[in-house]
Image (cartoon, helix red, strand yellow):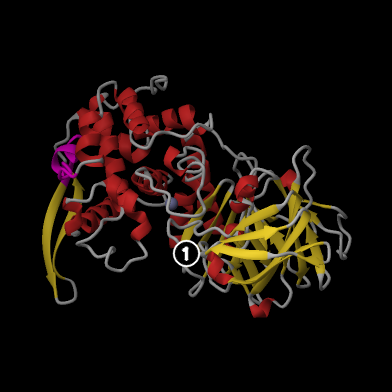
Amino acid sequence: MSSILRLMPIRLASFALLACVLALPSRATIEYEISLAHPELHTFHIRMTVPNVSGSLTVQMPAWNALYEIRDFSAHVQKVEAKNGTSPLPIEKVDKQTWHITGTGTITVSYGTFWDEPGPFATQLNSEHAFINPAMILMYVPDRRTENINCSFASVPSGWRLETPAPLESFQSNQMGQSNQMGSGWTVQSAAFDALADTPFEIGYFEAVTLSGVAKPISVVVHGKIEKRQEFETKLAQICRYEISLMGGAPFERYLFIFHVGEGMGGGGMEHANGTAIAAPNENILLAVSAHEFFHLWNVKRIRPASLEPVDYTKEQYTKALWFAEGVTSTYERYALLRTGIWNKNVYYAELGRQISDLEARPANAWQSAELSSFDTWMENSAIYNRPENSVSYYTKGAVLGVLLDLWLRQQTDNMRGLDDMLRAINERFGKTGKPYRDHEDLELICTQTAGSSCKEFFDSYVSGTKPFPYEEYFGFAALKIRRVIRTSREAGTQTLFEISEDDSASEKQKEIRNGILKGQTSKPAAKAAD
Ligand SMILES: [Zn+2]
């Protein structure tokens, strides 16, 4: 069941203003005004006002955001100008993404930026809606990223509504229920540029609902159409409830799913601290991507690798941890679908077999480790790099590694602990404290503490090393058989496919491990997470 959520009544006249007001003490407040005038022309007009400048101001456009890929958002930027009041100021471009302005006092920088790309990793302004990843359109002051932000939306077309995962208390109308006029409007507080950069906006005509039966408010905004809406929402709520209970509570006050559904809407999902934006052609894919993105609430948004902190928007940020941050999140995407009953176990086994087949079909699997694949993510915009001879996906390799690690942990502990316990221990130590983890060392350490015996050989062999994965031995722990099947077809040529099935002659211990994986349980209550 679901009910229509109206976060607040948005009734916007033409040329209305959505003002985001920030009222935090101390430090200066940097203001942005984003104009949506003439959305059919796809150009946002930005006005950025920076107070307390003495002598000079440097502003930069991020080179990357959302994807681990240099995309140079400055290429979208047009006509950068700077003023102090009405007086134009000297402005010099010093590299592809940096401008240097000479001036003192309060300086206003204005520019246009053209965006008409669909999908969660992009930004789009057209006559139907605006979807904004703020880091793609907003410049920042490099040494003032921690200052408060006051952001307003101007010239919003009549009747458009706004949704964002920004915390509810920061999203308030100045004049509730009144038609908006210039200068009146709405509030979204951001304590820093990085927080705003992690807060997407959907503005346009859409339906918004809240999921029922989940501990904290979870809202869903749909741009496009979901056919079996009620069934979809029921399943989505099941997934959210499962993941929240698995991880011992919701780490948010309010969460927002922004869905772009249909062909031509782009594909994939992007995680944010308190929400996600997902584009998918149909409901089944939407549900699977949702299970993945929702788990990012913990793994990567709060359980954060040290290599990705603080964010460097100017260039590649190298990390060895994506096999865990993305791959193990994919392990849990499938566990969530399985353990909520949305998938039966045969669907799960078939999907796991398909992943192993994909991984083993790539010659690069023999030499590119899970950590090296993570490190080289910045080359994924190269067609040659993506060839099977040149790379493996850290999503696939990491997702399979997650299952192998789970099997190994359960075997080591007589099924008293598994990957769920390792994730909860990492969440206690790092997620809840806000301390980032060391890419390799802390994952191995927590694994060792969960297992009660050293994980070094596993990590050396399969995480940083490239020893062939021990499928037969590890699946044997759970009495699962893995079979290689050679198939030849005219389209695909000769392929080796992996098929997983249950071994009927399982011992009690093997059955316990198998059921543990399928149902997300251990043989006894989990021991207190190691500290
Ligand atoms: Zn992901």
Residue picked out by circle 1: 71
In this rendering, position of residue 458 left or right of residue 134: left
Is residue 335 in sight in this rendering? Answer: no
The boundaries of the magenta stretch are 466-481
Question: In the structure shown, which secondary structural element does the residue marked by tag 1 occupy?
Answer: loop
The image position of residue 249, as x and y in percent, is: 55, 34
Q: Is residue 168 magenta?
A: no
Asked if the beta carbon under badge 1 is closer than 8 A to the nearest atom of ligand 1, the reply is no
For residue 529, above or below residue 13 = above
Q: Residue at x 50, y 56 (%)?
A: 66
Q: Residue at x 40, y 43 (%)?
A: 339
In this rendering, position of residue 242 left or right of residue 89: left
For residue 218, above or below residue 269 = above
Q: Residue at x 42, y 28 (%)?
A: 425
Is residue 44 in sight in this rendering? Answer: yes
Amino acid carrying mark 1 in the image: Arg
The image position of residue 441, as x and y in percent, is: 34, 31
